[in-house]
Amino acid sequence: MKYQEAKEKFISTWGSLGTLWGINKAMAQIQALLFISTKPLSMEDIMDELKISRGNTSMNLRQLMDWGIVTKELIPGERKEFFSTEKDVQELARHIAKERSRREIKPVIKVLKDISSIKDDNTEKTKELIKQTKALHDLAETADLLMNKIVNQEPNWITKSLFKLLK
Amino acid sequence: MKYQEAKEKFISTWGSLGTLWGINKAMAQIQALLFISTKPLSMEDIMDELKISRGNTSMNLRQLMDWGIVTKELIPGERKEFFSTEKDVQELARHIAKERSRREIKPVIKVLKDISSIKDDNTEKTKELIKQTKALHDLAETADLLMNKIVNQEPNWITKSLFKLLK
DNA sequence: CTAAACTTTCAATAATTATTGAAAGTTTGT
DNA sequence: ACAAACTTTCAATAATTATTGAAAGTTTAG
């Protein structure tokens, strides 16, 4: 496997993985491209490499910036904007984990809490609904806490966590 | 909030969360419905509750069975088939985590390994590709191991893990 | 201030993914 | 063996989601 082939494989694999986990393909691929680039890239660069439109590139770069994993680099003497992604894989994972927790998990935990707090009218089905949503709520809360804990012990959080669990 | 409203909210929230994480809405909703049901449900029951077609129900039930979180219950004296889901929230999470690891994470780890093993031709870009995909590979491998570790210390794995990390 | 260089927005369109429904397939009771 | 009861399959269709591209917007150099 030569460089170009390997690069294309990486970008497309990353795109597919993204799709599988609910992340838009272009967004994942832009991030992948920046991740292996040796220098910040302009919108033109990204459009050319990935063969996607200007609009698509612009919108997805914005989303990546909203997620906090891509930043605009202003290069002296250059009119256009350049972009780069967090290069440290652990920082990257931290950002993503924290954002998904904040945007997606926390709100669901809130809903589960509300649902599991409905008045118990002593019918079997109400009891079951309360019991099961409460169990889900508790699990989600613990898992979320656990994840944030793992992700917050920098640096090398992940290896540290693994060792702790192996003890 | 009354029972019916709470139930509908639960099912729709679960469906949306599924969508966000790359799981088809009907599949998530069927699982949600079974999860709070006091007894196994037939295909008719599910179709009526969720207002989805027979074909859709059949296909998604099959997928849920492939994932190992829904089982067919043969009720004596009944011709039709009934379905129920794993009711223990922790078992449920274990199944899902293990399946996603097996189907989605492990294959990507393999690809990352291949890519990071290309011959180093000493150009800067090749060095960067190798370095970054190797870092991603190592992270993914450790994270996957960590997750399987957490999920394998039953029962009450999740609380146990949390305590270990808090120490 | 103006025009060139660049970015963003968004309605239109394309691509993908989910859903339907009816025909084909299967199982079971008699 | 037959037919009723039930499930699966899959081509057609609908719904959703992603992408384009051109017009509008913004910034900067002169």
Image (cartoon, coloured by chain):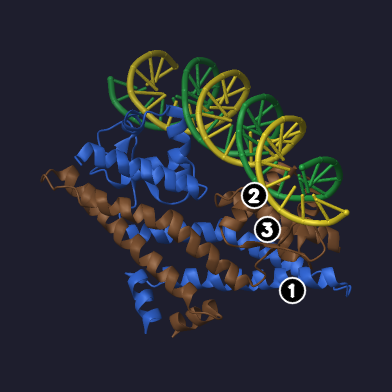
Chain colours: A brown, B blue, C green, D yellow
The chain under label 1 reads B
Q: What SS does tag 3 mark? A: helix
Disc 3 marks which amino acid?
Answer: Gln
Say which quarter of the image contains residue D1. top left
| Callouts 2 and 1 on one subunit | no
Disc 2 marks which amino acid?
Answer: Asn
Does residue A30 appear anywhere in the picture? yes
Q: Dividing the image into 4 quarters, which one contains the C terminus of chain B?
A: bottom left
Where does label 3 land, which residue?
A: A31
Count of numbered tags: 3
The Cα–Cα distance between marks 2 and 1, rounded to whole angstroms, is 25 Å
Whether A31 is drawn above or below A164: the answer is above
Q: Is residue A85 left or right of residue B120?
A: left
Residue A39, how many percent across, how many down? 78, 66
Residue under the image location 34 percent in, 34 percent down:
B46
Residue under the image location 21 percent in, 51 percent down:
A130
Query: Which label belongs to residue B131?
Result: 1
Disc 1 marks which amino acid?
Answer: Lys
Front residue of D25/A156: it is: D25
Q: What SS does tag 2 mark? A: helix
Q: Is residue A152 left or right of residue B83?
A: right
Neighbour tally class for label 3: few under 14, some 14-19, many 20 plus, Cα within 10 Å: many
Query: Which label belongs to residue A60?
Result: 2
Residue B120, how many percent across, how many down? 85, 73
